[in-house]
């Protein structure tokens, strides 16, 4: 199966070039947009009367072992909330008994090897891997297998850190529709020479090297595409500084990509919605609250 190829596609309506020109600013020699719903809200994948669950996209989320399942459950629920029609957690056999009682609409499928994982993922439109996946060679093998399955990949957390000092192995299997979502520590493990350049320029160069979308998380998250486009997110919320919120963001990005939204726009929309949902909730937010609050943020864009 060929990888999805929508990363540099065009949308109906106003051209990206026109919106880019209106919303961008000069940062040194770089042109960077402010991430604003006006850029991508018309591309959000709203269902209509004829839409069925499989038409809304199929998202897979890879879980870690039995004691490391929470991150995958957070990502899966976020993918379901943001609109993916079918969400399935793919997990090692020992994790089934932990995950199955804790989910409802999300399905569970065990795999016992990277080859089996790759086969199970062939039915998926997008797959999230990395949150609590484990820092061992099985994670490397799983990513390599998933790269052959045809789904767009969202790679986070352990799926990034395991490639410290060997990033070329990761970049070799990526596609322009894939998304990397590092925080600053994970970013430095993959791109040790880039942080000194400043966040915006570092993210843009990282996306060029990886030939994938890069989401450099932080108070002002930077979203960069492999073709040089970049957006800076300015509605960041301090309430997101709590465990698990990054896993939710990965699931949101994956859920939008599964619905065939362009990966760069999907990442941009998810980052903005993630922050907007957190700010609406305010004090006391924990990561589990984000999926429950997401419908209000989505309604505000309809």
Image (tube, grey):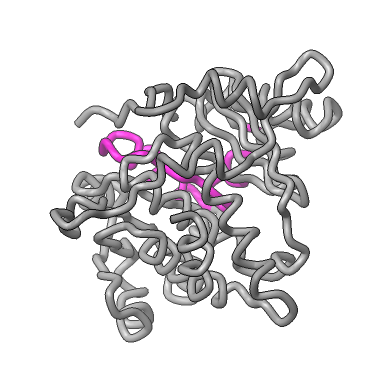
Q: In this view, does 17 lie above or below 106?
A: above
Please report the residue visible at 46 percent of the width from the left and 22 percent of the height from the top: 15
Q: On the image, which quarter does residue 78 sit in?
A: bottom left
Q: Which of 142 and 18 is in front in this view?
A: 18
Q: Does the magenta stretch include residue 202?
A: no
Residue 149, x across and y down, in percent? 26, 38
- Foreground: 67 or 213? 213
Q: Can residue 301 be seen in this view?
A: yes
> Looking at the image, which residue is at 51% across and 61% down?
300
The residue at the point 28 percent across, 45 percent down is: 125
> In the picture provided, is 80 more to the left or to the right than 195?
left
Q: Which residue lies furthest to the top in this view?
A: 29
Q: Where is residue 22 in the image (x, y as percent from the top left)?
A: 64, 25
Looking at the rendering, the stretch of residues picked out in magenta corresponds to 136-165
Q: Percent x, y for residue 3?
A: 29, 30
* Residue nearest the viewer, comparing 72 with 286: 286
């Amino acid at each position: 199966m060929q990888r999805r190829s929508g990363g540099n596609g065009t949308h109906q309506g106003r051209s990206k070039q026109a919106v880019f020109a209106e919303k961008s600013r000069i940062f040194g020699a770089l042109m960077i947009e402010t991430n604003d719903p006006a850029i991508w809200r018309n591309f959000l994948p709203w269902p209509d009367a004829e839409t069925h669950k499989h038409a809304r996209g199929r998202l897979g989320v890879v879980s870690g072992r039995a004691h490391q399942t929470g991150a995958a459950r957070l990502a899966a629920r976020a993918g379901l909330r943001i609109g993916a029609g079918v969400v399935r957690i793919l997990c090692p056999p020992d994790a089934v008994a932990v995950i199955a009682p804790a989910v409802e609409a999300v399905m569970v499928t065990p795999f016992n090897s990277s080859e089996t994982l790759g086969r199970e993922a062939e039915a998926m439109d997008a797959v999230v891997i990395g949150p609590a996946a484990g820092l061992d060679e099985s994670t490397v093998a799983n990513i390599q297998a998933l790269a052959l399955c045809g789904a767009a990949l969202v790679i986070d957390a352990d799926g990034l850190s395991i490639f410290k000092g060997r990033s070329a192995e990761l970049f070799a299997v990526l596609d322009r529709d894939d998304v990397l979502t590092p925080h600053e520590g994970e970013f430095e493990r993959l791109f040790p020479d880039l942080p000194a350049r400043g966040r915006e320029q570092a993210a843009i160069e990282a996306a060029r090297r990886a030939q994938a979308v890069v989401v450099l998380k932080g108070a002002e998250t930077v979203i960069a595409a492999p073709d040089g486009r970049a957006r800076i997110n300015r509605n960041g919320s301090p309430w997101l500084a709590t465990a698990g919120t990054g896993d939710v963001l990965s699931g949101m990005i994956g859920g939008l990509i599964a619905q065939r939204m362009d990966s760069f726009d999907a990442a941009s929309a998810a980052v903005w919605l993630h922050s907007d949902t957190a700010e609406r909730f305010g004090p006391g937010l924990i990561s589990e609250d984000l999926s429950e609050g997401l419908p209000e943020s989505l309604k505000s864009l309809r």
